[in-house]
Image: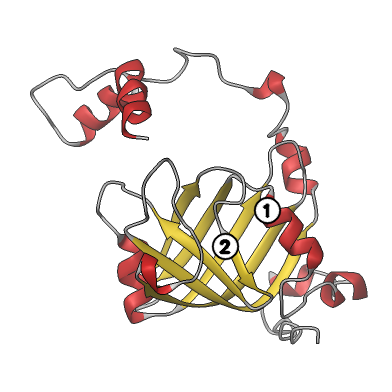
Amino acid sequence: MPAAPPPPLPTDDPVLAGYRTPGGLVLDKVIDHLDRHCREFIAHSPFATLATADADGWPEISPRGGDRGFVHVLDEHRLALPDRPGNNRVDSLRNVAVNPRAALMFLVPGVEQTLRVYGTAELVGHDELDVDLTEFGRAPLSVLVLTVRKAYFQCPKSVMRSGLWDPAQRVEPGTLTPFGRVIKDHCALDVDLPDDATIRAGLAEEL
């Protein structure tokens, strides 16, 4: 069953009034489950962004990554997103605890389309699901289970315009300020922090 179409644009907004009505394919492509095409895409995705909001509606977006297929499709209506060790801010998880609405956007390197999945989320323990969520030799600290309300593939125009997967668009090492210096300045620290190479080496040991 296709998901419900979005509400019509308000005719009294002068900015929104300048947009044309979307075509039938743009609306009809929205589905309310994860079909074989969605499952295939998720199985090849090593990176996704998680969007949540707090009780007051303030948004949060968090990058999530792992091996290809690190987000598990439990069935055509549920996804399992393991939470790996991080900085322990757990902003997204705090949001889900008070506002279950959430969304994921999946990317596959080299593929210009993206997949957007929306639904309601809950947090469960890693041992509450009948699936092995071990990655890099560790079980997740918790698992976000998303019950799917709608899913659809986004057209490739934004990725094409950005040249996201074009090697020529890569920023050469040393172009940006080292991350350790950025954090030192943002936190007004008096001590030097590890350089990027040391940080990456430490992350590799943690994984």
Residue sitting at 80 percent across and 62 percent down? 37
Seen in the picture, residue 72 relative to 46 is either above or below; the reply is: below
Q: Which residue is mark 1?
A: 43
Q: Which numbered mark, 2 or 1, is in the foreground of this view?
A: 1
Q: Residue furthest left?
A: 190
For residue 29, side relative to residue 184 (left or right) = right
Mark 1: give few (<14), some (14-19) or many (20+) Cα within 10 Å. some
Q: Which image quarter: residue 24?
A: bottom right
For residue 137, side relative to residue 76 (left or right) = left
Q: Which residue is mark 2?
A: 104
- Horizontal and vertical percent position of residue 110: 74, 36
Residue 14 in sight here: no
Q: Secondary structure at mark 2?
A: strand
For residue 24, side relative to residue 106 (left or right) = right
- Horizontal and vertical percent position of residue 25: 90, 71
Amino acid found under the numbered disc labelled 2: Leu
**For residue 35, which numbered disc appears in the image?**
none
Residue sitting at 37 percent across and 51 percent down? 84
Residue sitting at 35 percent across and 71 percent down? 95
Mark 2: give few (<14), some (14-19) or many (20+) Cα within 10 Å. many
Amino acid found under the numbered disc labelled 1: Ala
Q: Residue furthest right?
A: 24
Q: Quadrant of the N terminus?
A: bottom right
- Horizontal and vertical percent position of residue 111: 77, 42
Q: Which image quarter: residue 83?
A: bottom left
* Between 120 and 201, the one nearer to me in the picture: 201
Q: Quadrant of the C terminus?
A: top left
Upstream in sequence: badge 2 or badge 1: 1
Residue sitting at 39 percent across and 42 percent down? 137
